[in-house]
Amino acid sequence: MVGRSQSDRNQLPLFLLRLLCLLPTGLPVRSGDFNRSTDNMTVRQGDTAILRCFVEDKSSKVAWLNRSGIIFAVDDKWSLDPRVELEKRSPFEYSLRIQKVDVSDEGPYICSVQTNQHTKTMQVYLIVQVPPKISNISADITVNEGSNVTLMCIAYGRPEPMITWRHLTPTARDFEGEEEFLEIQGITREQSGRYECKAANEVASADVKQVRVTVNYPPIITESNSNEATTGKQAILRCEASAVPAPDFEWYKDDTRSRRINSAQGLEIRNTGSRSVLMVANVTEEHYGNYTCVAANKLGITNTSLYLYKRVSPTKPMSSSERGSNVHYKFKVGPGTPIDNATSLAASLWLMANILLCLFCTC
Ligand SMILES: *[C@@H]1O[C@H](CO)[C@@H](O)[C@H](O)[C@H]1NC(C)=O
Ligand SMILES: *[C@@H]1O[C@H](CO)[C@@H](O)[C@H](O)[C@H]1NC(C)=O
Ligand SMILES: *[C@@H]1O[C@H](CO)[C@@H](O)[C@H](O)[C@H]1NC(C)=O
Ligand SMILES: *[C@@H]1O[C@H](CO)[C@@H](O)[C@H](O)[C@H]1NC(C)=O
Ligand SMILES: *[C@@H]1O[C@H](CO)[C@@H](O)[C@H](O)[C@H]1NC(C)=O
Ligand SMILES: *[C@@H]1O[C@H](CO)[C@@H](O)[C@H](O)[C@H]1NC(C)=O
Ligand SMILES: *[C@@H]1O[C@H](CO)[C@@H](O)[C@H](O)[C@H]1NC(C)=O
Ligand SMILES: *[C@@H]1O[C@H](CO)[C@@H](O)[C@H](O)[C@H]1NC(C)=O
Ligand SMILES: *[C@@H]1O[C@H](CO)[C@@H](O)[C@H](O)[C@H]1NC(C)=O
């Protein structure tokens, strides 16, 4: 296949040269004349290519040809292309200059030199390189968790650019293989974020573009804390949920749908993205109790219960009995409330004393 095209490539210039009478028709063409090695010349698209050719004898008949025909025959320009001209910096030079080289200029170029009985040719294969360029990339998309997603990144360049994908946030993961299409099956919320497509070849620096993938998922409550408050003071209940799109919050008292809380009567609900805060400006007896925070988006709904406990705050200097009751109170507080070590130590000593006392009693 390659051999055939090589010989085809050789036949056309021969034929054209005969046509030009540059090559005497009867003259046998020796095999050595046309088995020159082909040199490659690499030029970047838009640059100027200078294909060098030198003659040994000033009286030689010279011509430049390419696959589509004769470009120059001696000093006559056959090509109509204004980008092409001869470069002759010495009487022996017969170089071809091509300005603003384009992809269509790629191919073999032959400098044919005929002296008396000899025809010598010099062939150069012009390779046109093009920097990588991403011509089309998927638009930003929003999908539901579990969907199959296909991201597209089309690039051109010469040589053909290598395409690689990278998940920038939050995993910073590189994907295997070079693919114009990145397929993600059953996408998870962790796989949301920005994806980067990179098209690279050795010609110039890589072209990089990004596509943002948003993965919707139903809310999950990530944080909710019961709280305690003193009558007459301010109280706060906080509820946080993770969801895409951002959740809408509602608050209820005693897990009763009919007791929806609105920002009124000294109560205020403040929502900021993934967080909702229920504020009681001035706590009264009926504010204590069980609250439900409901987080919802178009994919789902969830809720959690929070309790507003009553705190008995000592205002006067404490008597010993009050101090005792205070210790007692602290043990009633739910898990997660820090208990200071001194109190804990006091309590265990007290417990130990009681056990000893009991032991003595039974004796
Ligand atoms: C032509 O090719 C043959 C065989 O590959 C080689 O021996 C010979 O030197 C070549 N001739 C020229 C002028 O390159
Ligand atoms: C020219 O390029 C071709 C393909 O790119 C390659 O196979 C060949 O070896 C190169 N020739 C030279 C002389 O570099
Ligand atoms: C031959 O050269 C001309 C410039 O003279 C160019 O326009 C044309 O594309 C070339 N053809 C090939 C096959 O390289
Ligand atoms: C990009 O590709 C998409 C899908 O093949 C096509 O609909 C769109 O027209 C293309 N955009 C451009 C600028 O080529
Ligand atoms: C995702 O692709 C897998 C494998 O091709 C297929 O079994 C599944 O049904 C697809 N899921 C959706 C939601 O299209
Ligand atoms: C809280 O409410 C009580 C009873 O309604 C009232 O006496 C008190 O002044 C209020 N406190 C504040 C800070 O508004
Ligand atoms: C909270 O969720 C439970 C179980 O899903 C449900 O029975 C209850 O009605 C919900 N509460 C509210 C106030 O939506
Ligand atoms: C608050 O209400 C929820 C739902 O009815 C219930 O599961 C939870 O035990 C209640 N909490 C308290 C402290 O009563
Ligand atoms: C309280 O106890 C914990 C572990 O029992 C210890 O890490 C911490 O340093 C103690 N704090 C004080 C103030 O003694």
Image (spheres, rainbow, N blue to C red):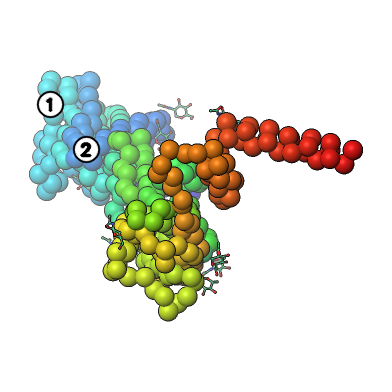
Which of the 4 image quadrants contains residue 127? top left
Residue 57, can we see it? yes
Give left or right: position of 133 versus 173.
left
Which of the 4 image quadrants contains residue 357? top right
Residue placed at 47% from the left, 75% from the top? 256
For label 2, being within 8 Å of ligand 3 is answered: no
Inspect the image, locate mark 2, and give the three-letter code of the amino acid beneath it: Trp
Q: Quarter of the image for the C terminus: give it.
A: top right
Residue placed at 25% from the left, 37% from the top? 44
Q: CA distance from mark 2 to mark 1?
A: 13 Å
Q: Quadrant of ligand 6?
A: bottom left
Do the numbered discs 2 and 1 sit on residues whose CB atoms are within 8 Å?
no
Check disc 2 and report the residue beneath it: 64
In primary-sequence order, the first of circles 2 and 1 is: 2
Which of the 4 image quadrants contains residue 327? top right
Q: Between 272 and 167, which is closer to the camera in this rendering?
A: 272
Inspect the image, locate mark 1, and give the three-letter code of the amino acid beneath it: Lys
Q: Between 101 and 134, which is closer to the camera in this rendering?
A: 134
Helix, strand or loop at mark 2: strand
Q: Between 339 and 57, which is closer to the camera in this rendering?
A: 339
Q: Residues within 10 Å of mark 2 (few under 14, many from 20)?
A: many
Helix, strand or loop at mark 1: loop
Residue 19, can we see it? no
Q: Between 2 and 70, which is closer to the camera in this rendering?
A: 2
Q: Position of residue 52 (x, y in %)?
A: 23, 28
Check disc 1 and report the residue beneath it: 88
Q: Position of residue 285 (x, y in %)?
A: 42, 63
Rendered view: 263 above or below 55? below
Q: Identify the residue at the far bottom of this view.
A: 258
